Image: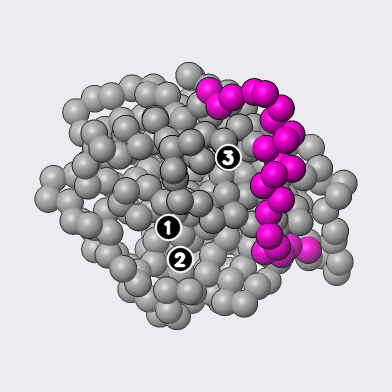
Amino acid sequence: MNFHQPPTTYTGEVYLKVTNLDKITAFYTEIIGFQILSKEGNRVELTADGKHPLLVLEQPENIKPKEPRRTGLYHFALLLPTRADLGKAIKHFSRNQVRLGASDHLVSEALYLSDPDGNGIEIYRDREPEAWEWQNGFVSMSTDPLDAQAIVEASGNEEWDGLPAGTVMGHVHLHVANLGESQAFYEALGFEVVTPYPQALFMSTGKYHHHIGMNTWNGAGAPSPSEDSAGLKAYTLVYPEQNTLEEAIKNIEALDVKVNKVDETFITKDPAGNGIILRIHQ
């Protein structure tokens, strides 16, 4: 089962406002393993497969460091195709002395780190969906210690050569101000809760363990960052076809949410002020 293509609605490109484009680009290419797809002015598009952007970096004028205790990005999560790929990543990060967090989430095995601006990054691989445990409509997730040694052993003698071409934006996890408001908004967009967690919710389509995470760990009622703060500019939700997208737009407009059409995409914000680009699968 591929949870990042139709008929699911899934997460696509992430757009970040950065303080130093050259420095952040170097981090994402040399440490994370992206390739540069295009570079023009104050904007760089990064790719894993050489064809499609996954991460877009922009350095606005008068950008300020990321503000603390705000809504915005908790982390974006890059989903690798195999456990061996994750093992190669561990070897690469260890060799480059990158500080990592790590967890076994039962449904997945994950590494955590931050970019130089303080944006969170998860790099993970999924266990087979048949191994996920569901009860009363909720999937079991945990934060157990990661067996890094077994993961490294799964990679054999293979070495890291950048992000594999099959890497996708597995999910996006957001800081929000109010879980109830955010849940109602994302339900209107077509997502359902698959795991409740202390001060957090995980939502998906198609019974994935989560395409969207949200939490109030920066404080309930946390304010949105100012426009000139580094951090999340927007992330993308990709709908399987036009009718599903139009229904989602109609649903959030019924909640008095403003939606703007730009070319073939639609732009909106969730109740916490997180920017979202809505488009159909191409």
The C terminus is located in which quarter?
Answer: top right
* Residue 61, disc: none
* Left or right: 193, with 226 as reference point: right
Q: Look at the image and say whether residue 147 sits in the magenta stretch.
A: yes
Q: Which residue is mark 3?
A: 90
Residue at 31% from the left image edge and 68% from the top image edge: 68
Q: Of discs 3 and 1, which sits in the foreground?
A: 3
Instruction: Establish if 177 lies above or below 27.
Output: below
* Left or right: 190, with 250 as reference point: right
User: Which element type, helix, strand or loop, lies under badge 1?
Assistant: strand
Q: Which residue is mark 2?
A: 175
- The boundaries of the magenta stretch are 140-161
Q: Of discs 2 and 3, which sits in the foreground?
A: 3
Residue at 79% from the left image edge and 37% from the top image edge: 1
Provide the major secondary structure of the magenta segment: loop
**N-terminal label among 2 and 3:** 3
Instruction: Verify CB contact (< 8 Å) between mark 2 and mark 1.
Output: yes
Q: Look at the image and say whether residue 84 sits in the magenta stretch.
A: no
Rounded to the nearest whole Å, what is the CA distance between mark 3 and mark 1? Answer: 24 Å
Instruction: Establish if 99 lies above or below 282.
Output: below
Instruction: Verify CB contact (< 8 Å) between mark 2 and mark 3.
Output: no
- In the image, 180 versus 217, the foreground residue is 217
Rounded to the nearest whole Å, what is the CA distance between mark 2 and mark 3? Answer: 27 Å
Rounded to the nearest whole Å, what is the CA distance between mark 2 and mark 1? Answer: 6 Å
Instruction: Establish if 166 lies above or below 209.
Output: above
**N-terminal label among 3 and 1:** 1
User: Which element type, helix, strand or loop, lies under badge 2?
Assistant: strand
Residue at 64% from the left image edge and 57% from the top image edge: 103
Amino acid marked by disc 2: His
**N-terminal label among 2 and 1:** 1
Q: Which residue is mark 1?
A: 73
Residue 165, horizontal then vertical, whole percent: 58, 23
